[in-house]
Amino acid sequence: MERRIGMEASIAMAEAVGLCDADVVSAYPITPQTHIVEHLSELVANGELDANFVPVESEHSAMSVCCGSSAAGARTYTATSSQGLALMHEILFIAPALRLPIVMAVANRSLSGPISIWNDHSDIMAERDIGWIQVFVENAQEAIDLTIWSFRIAEDKRVSLPTIVNFDGFILSHMIEPVLMPDREQVQDFLPPFEPLQRLDIDNPVSMGPVGIPDVYTEAKYVQHKLLTDAYGPIVETFGELEKHFGRKYRPVETYRADDADVLLLTMGALGETAMTAVDERRKRGQKVGLIKLRLFRPFPYKDLLNAIGDKPVLGVMDRAVSFGGPVGPVASEVKAALFSARKHPLVPEFIVGLGGRDTSIADFHSIFDDLFEAAERDTTPDPRFVGLRE
Amino acid sequence: MHEVRFHGRGGQGAVTSAELLAQAAIADGKSAQAFPSFGPERRGAPVIAFARVADAIIRNRTAISEPNIVIVLDPSLLRLVKVNQGLKEGGLIVVNSSKSLEKVREEFGFKARLVVVDANHIAREEIGRVITNTTMLGAMLAAEPMVEQKTLEAALEKRFGRLAPKNISAFRRAQREAVISDAV
């Protein structure tokens, strides 16, 4: 039975990991991920979670421990943020190449410099191509549900790939809000025990991660790409299973009041909620705006995105990171790439929003909608805009 | 929707106040959020915390810049911080002060609806320490009963364990002793 309680999103996420009976948790504390790891270490210390908690001296080591424990057949979890994720960088590529279904939370935060502990998506956008499944959540409930789901999809034998749950630092991680917390029985009905494809076992020795000579490297990378792309099917299927067990519906691309909208805005992560409130206000004024919310970032859901956009004339894209000297908005760049193959495509105005913890208000979203209507009227794409920029 | 901003000093329990209010509202079946100001905090330094309480689902990840209720846990902050910054029209200020309501109004020029309670005195007598967060929640509830008495007391019990009875006494006494006046 689910319990409706008030809980901080980070604690809720840690509780979800506990309900999933993780075997190994290895992490290094970093703001704003800290509460997840603190709570998990408490659960282990109190005997509420029968897991090995492996404290380490850096995130590089944390991810190395995770690779080792997952290879040994342990259900493995970690969490990080910002510089910590950056420090994991070289090991992040190893996990999917070895088909290790590690689950990781990233409390999304800006990167230095200047030094900033606050929220944006700079950390994860720099890790776009690591080969992990990646989802984004908007609230604490989604953080619980998709943490539980992540173990299921990661460990699905057709997939066997590591999975990241992205959740916005502070504006979500430090928020106490109501959640429906499932019980252990519900979670165990949904999540079968972990059976690895193969495991490190001294009685049946295998070799993992040998040298990929030029004769095999291309094939190895092709297989990896195909596996992640083909994970789309099992992802949709397990979203369906999640709905059957918990009653909440998730899709790779979700929409809000988009069907009859004149202009659309694409969001990713917790600011999608503020955007929904702005959409509601706009609709009351009789202006038809709608949202597209990118739930699944990897594998990128091309077809679902094109279906959601339909024949709308304008699709604004919100980015929470900067691709310097390049396409400006990393998500907008991906969306444009997806649209290139479409016969007809909308104008795609780009908005850089909420960098380094800059508060993004409902009024900011209204200013974005103003730009979208103006673009539609003029039939011209404006230059990318840094929302709230002081001149 | 109620948007509440708590002003305190690091260690006085402003963040806990916001959490207790949100927990009570959630137990009442409402929607609520509680969150600290995001960033480094130091014991003794001025801090703020926030809560939202609403009947409908809250979809908002912005800071609270225009609260309709401001609660000041520490009398010394009134001279340091413009606590009524951004206060909405028709809003409420709840102040911990040993001074009379008229004197507080005059000294700080507050025009809004005002509640004054000597929370330091009450907390010292009832709890034995000048930690005013639960006392100030009582003063707020006297003027703005946005959550049920019993659910807030249940939240206090859950949070404070064996110290709960003392906190509940302070909370109830502040409800009785709070001086409330309309906007001028």
Image (cartoon, rainbow, N blue to C red):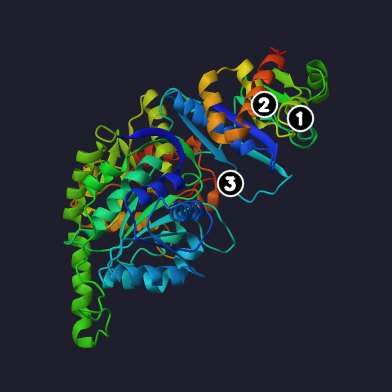
The alpha-carbon separation of the residues under discs 2 and 1 comes to 13 Å
Of the two numbered discs 1 and 3 on the same chain, state the one appearing first in sequence.
3
Q: Which residue is mark 3?
A: B38
Viewer-proximal residue among A38 and A112: A38
Left/right of residue B31 with respect to residue A304 in the rendered view: right
Residue B74: x %, y % from top left: 74, 33
Q: Which residue is mark 1?
A: B124
Examine the rendered structure and indicate whether residue A200 appears above or below residue A111: below
The amino acid type, in three-letter code, at marker 2 is Met
The amino acid type, in three-letter code, at marker 3 is Phe
When asked about the image quadrant of residue A153, the answer is bottom left
When asked about the image quadrant of residue A62, the answer is bottom left
Q: Are marks 3 and 2 on the same chain?
A: yes
Secondary structure of the residue carrying numbered label 3: loop
Q: Nearer the viewer, mark 1 or mark 3?
A: 1
Which of the chains bears the disc numbered 1?
A: B
Which of the chains bears the disc numbered 2?
A: B
Viewer-proximal residue among A160 and B5: A160
Residue B30: x %, y % from top left: 44, 25
Secondary structure of the residue carrying numbered label 2: helix
Do we see residue B87 in this rendering? no
Q: Which residue is mark 2?
A: B136
Q: Residue at x 49, y 61 (%)?
A: A82
Q: Residue at x 27, y 83 (%)?
A: A210
Viewer-proximal residue among A127 and A80: A80
